[in-house]
Image: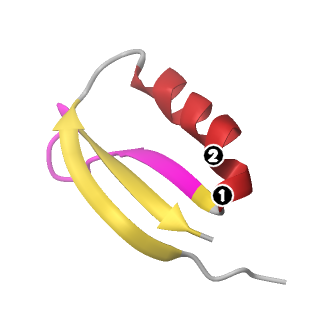
Amino acid sequence: MGSKKEVLSTVKIQKAPDVYKMVDSLNRTLKDRDLLFGLALDEEDEQKMVFTIYKT
């Protein structure tokens, strides 16, 4: 049941309050192209976030 995701790109960005809205919009818009976008807090620097693009 688990689908394999391939990481296409990962980048650290400055933490911003509305960045999740961009990730949500990308996921809604590009899901039919087998792309998935992720956003997580950086474990090493609380002022950074990790943005990842996956191919599903």
Q: Residue at x 38, y 69 (%)?
A: 8
Where is residue 2? Give x, y as percent.
75, 82
Residue extending farthest front: 33
Q: What label sits on residue 22 in the rendered view? A: none
Please tell me which residue is depicted at 42% across the width and 16% down the height of the picture.
Answer: 18
Q: Quadrant of the C terminus?
A: bottom right
Mark 1 element type: helix
Pointer 2: what residue? Answer: 30
Seen as rendered, the residue at the extreme top is 17
Q: Which one is nearer the viewer's eye here, 20 or 47?
A: 20
Compared with residue 32, is residue 20 higher up or lower down, i.e. above or below? above
Q: Across the whole image, how many numbered discs are drawn on residues?
A: 2
Residue positioned 55% across, 37% down in the render = 26
Image height of 42 relative to 10, above or below:
above
Image quadrant where one finds the N terminus:
bottom right
The magenta stretch is 36-48
User: Label for residue 33?
Assistant: 1
Task: Tell me: 1 left or right of 35.
Answer: right
Q: Is residue 38 left or right of residue 16?
A: right
- Residue placed most toward the observer, 15 or 45: 15
- The reply to whether callout 1 and callout 2 are in contact (CB within 8 Å) is yes
Question: For mark 1, does the 10 Å Cα neighbourhood hold few (<14), some (14 to 19), or many (20 or more) residues?
Answer: few
